[in-house]
Image (cartoon, rainbow, N blue to C red):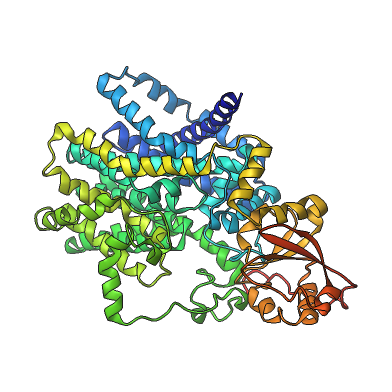
């Protein structure tokens, strides 16, 4: 029975992945049917990437109108396939029975992707996923709109992936939202294969194997983080720009130029870091066209990227007066100071920064505590450094790929140390190393070597599945899984069951449980209910009670070992009554009549 239940659960989510893939591919092909492409791999990857961003923008438009509902999302999907009937007919006419090589590649792809798919079936528990990615998707899905969420760490952001999550959430639940990231990862790997195959068969398979062989890629493909989408659009932007350059930059290649700008803008619509690719694509196109005294290509890229970015950053500006909210407050004096990030990154001498820069290849594999304790990059990149150094001297395409990677890595040193931020250029590094290895690897061994390069990611996926236990496919199994992965989850569940949507809990250092709270959930490092207002009052029960009441809280959730109010103080017991406790956390109800109401801190009006 357990095997049958898992098979049914897996089949349901596989169907979500297939519908999402087919819809994105058809939407992209509808736009790109006249653009000349080479291989089937290229048509699938580029069309799928464009389709994802088109769907995201369609759902965004629905949200702005307040129409992001189950029916509207289903209508968009059905409409895409009705309009794409010609795409389907063309595809069916071109079907050919694959030979033994085709079946071998398909079997290898299924085997390589199996751990990623199984990992995607676990309930969401990644920190930022339940902190704000899924809360935004839930808010979009439940309201049908695109609300400003003042209780979230950052109440508005570039949110192309979250809108796609919301569309999936409406129809298939929170676990199914992982299929968006999985599809983005698959499309990136296929695009790398298509890109590399244009040089040699070995280079294509090696590039895809290097990318999918990274444990951090496997991790991000199966969670609600948005890096997979950022990686896809960034890679597609660089690829489209390169296709335009190889075509001579003439009018017949204008479609690739517009795609480069559109994909770069899509990367910026996923995450602020994506703006790097808007800049680098624009500079590259300008550098290629300037010697011929042609400025129109750079203008075309800028217009395409701006058209994609405008709705997302316009919405941010509408609510906050700062299109890069909450960053650069000095440039936008009208910014909402409640969300100004407290503190700054520790300053380091230039010499230390340079040493950190040189250490990055080692740190992302073996010294992960210095880069946010993320899963490691594939050790193949570290072993391949000597080959890259040799290839830089002999292969022009390796030089410019590495230039883009190194420039991005330098920006990483100005950011909080988290290896996730480096994943955006991992496909470019994979392609550069694949080109370097292909110079020495016999072509007949390319597929076998690519499978060997998949091994670190495959083993990591298997380890994660073993460590997490069987995929929870029932409500009871899901609850037990969440209890193991999120120790304070039972405390939130208690509030859900006892008060439901009526409770307002202030959680001390349990901000990542936001998604699982049915009622209002307060407490984070930023915002009107930030920790800086509450933590200094922990030793003053009366003042703590008044501040929590002012914020609207009726319960206080405390995680053991993190912060501790004076629970044994009689003054604390007069104002707080413990209503729940377990081995990880406790919940205190605020007692007594609330003080005279004071006007709440309003949600800021748009544009202020």
At a point 27% along the width and 60% down the height, the residue shown is 405
Front position in the image: 291 or 315: 315
* Front position in the image: 521 or 508: 508
Which quarter shows the N terminus?
Answer: top right
| Residue at (65% x, 35% y) in the render | 474
Residue 63 at x, y percent in the picture: 63, 50
Residue 335 placement, left or right of 198: right
| 392 relative to 525, above or below | above
Q: Tell me where residue 316 sits by quadrant.
A: bottom right
Above or below residue 599? Residue 277 is above
Quadrant of the rendered image containing residue 565: bottom right
Q: Nearer the viewer, residue 607 or 218?
A: 218
- The residue that appears at 54% across and 36% down in the rendered structure is 470
Q: Residue at x 55, y 81 (%)?
A: 333
x then y, percent, for residue 273: 42, 62
- In screen coordinates, is 486 left or right of 19? right
């Amino acid at each position: 029975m357990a095997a049958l239940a898992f098979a049914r659960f897996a089949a349901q989510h596989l169907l979500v992945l297939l519908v999402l893939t087919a819809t994105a591919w058809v939407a992209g092909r509808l736009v790109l049917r006249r653009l000349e492409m080479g291989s089937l791999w290229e048509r699938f990857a580029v069309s799928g990437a464009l389709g994802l961003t088109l769907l995201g923008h369609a759902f965004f438009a629905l949200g702005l109108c307040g129409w992001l509902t189950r029916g509207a999302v289903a209508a968009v999907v059905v409409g895409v396939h009705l309009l794409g009937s010609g795409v389907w007919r063309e595809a069916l006419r071109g079907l050919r029975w694959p030979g033994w090589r085709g079946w071998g590649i398909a079997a290898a792809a299924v085997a390589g992707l199996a751990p990623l798919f199984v990992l995607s079936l676990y309930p969401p528990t990644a920190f930022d996923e339940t902190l704000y990615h899924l809360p935004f998707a839930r808010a979009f899905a439940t309201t049908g709109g695109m609300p400003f969420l003042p209780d979230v760490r950052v109440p508005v952001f570039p949110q192309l992936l979250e809108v796609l999550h919301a569309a999936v959430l409406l129809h298939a639940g929170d676990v199914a939202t992982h299929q968006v990231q999985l599809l983005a990862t698959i499309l990136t790997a296929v695009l790398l294969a298509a890109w590399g195959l244009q040089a040699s068969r070995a280079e294509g398979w090696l590039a895809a194997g290097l990318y999918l062989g990274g444990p951090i890629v496997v991790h991000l493909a199966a969670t609600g983080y948005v890096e997979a989408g950022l990686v896809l659009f960034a890679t597609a932007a660089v690829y489209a720009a390169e296709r335009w350059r190889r075509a001579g930059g003439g009018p017949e290649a204008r479609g690739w130029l517009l795609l480069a700008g559109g994909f770069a803008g899509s990367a910026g619509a996923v995450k602020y870091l994506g703006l790097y690719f808007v800049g680098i694509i624009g500079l590259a196109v300008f550098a290629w066209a300037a010697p011929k005294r042609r400025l129109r290509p750079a203008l075309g890229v800028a217009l395409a990227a701006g058209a994609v970015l405008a709705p997302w950053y316009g919405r941010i500006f509408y609510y906050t007066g700062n299109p890069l909210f909450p960053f650069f407050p000095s440039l936008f004096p009208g910014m909402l100071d409640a969300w100004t990030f407290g503190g700054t990154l520790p300053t380091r001498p230039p010499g230390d920064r340079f040493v950190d820069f040189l250490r990055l290849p080692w740190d992302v594999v073996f010294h992960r505590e210095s880069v946010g304790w993320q899963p490691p990059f594939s050790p193949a990149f570290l072993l391949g450094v000597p080959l890259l150094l040799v290839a830089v001297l002999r292969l022009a395409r390796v030089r410019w790929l590495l230039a883009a990677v190194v420039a991005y890595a330098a920006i990483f040193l100005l950011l909080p140390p988290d290896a996730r931020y480096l994943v955006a250029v991992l496909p470019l590094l994979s392609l550069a190393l694949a080109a370097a290895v292909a110079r020495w690897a016999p072509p007949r061994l390319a597929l076998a070597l690519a499978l060997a390069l998949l091994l670190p990611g495959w083993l990591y996926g298997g380890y994660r599945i073993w460590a997490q236990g069987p995929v929870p496919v029932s409500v009871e199994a899901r609850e037990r899984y969440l209890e193991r992965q999120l120790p304070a989850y039972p405390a939130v569940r208690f509030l859900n069951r006892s008060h439901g949507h009526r409770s307002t809990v202030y959680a001390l250092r349990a901000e990542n449980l936001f998604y699982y709270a049915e009622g209002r959930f307060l407490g984070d490092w930023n915002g009107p209910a930030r920790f800086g207002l509450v933590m200094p009052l922990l030793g003053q029960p009366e003042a703590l009670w008044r501040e929590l009441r002012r914020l609207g809280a009726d319960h206080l959730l405390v995680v053991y070992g993190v912060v501790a109010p004076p629970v044994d103080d009689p003054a604390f017991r007069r104002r707080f009554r413990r209503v729940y406790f377990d081995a990880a956390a406790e919940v205190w109800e605020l007692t007594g009549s609330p003080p005279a109401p004071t006007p709440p801190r309003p949600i800021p009006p748009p544009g202020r």
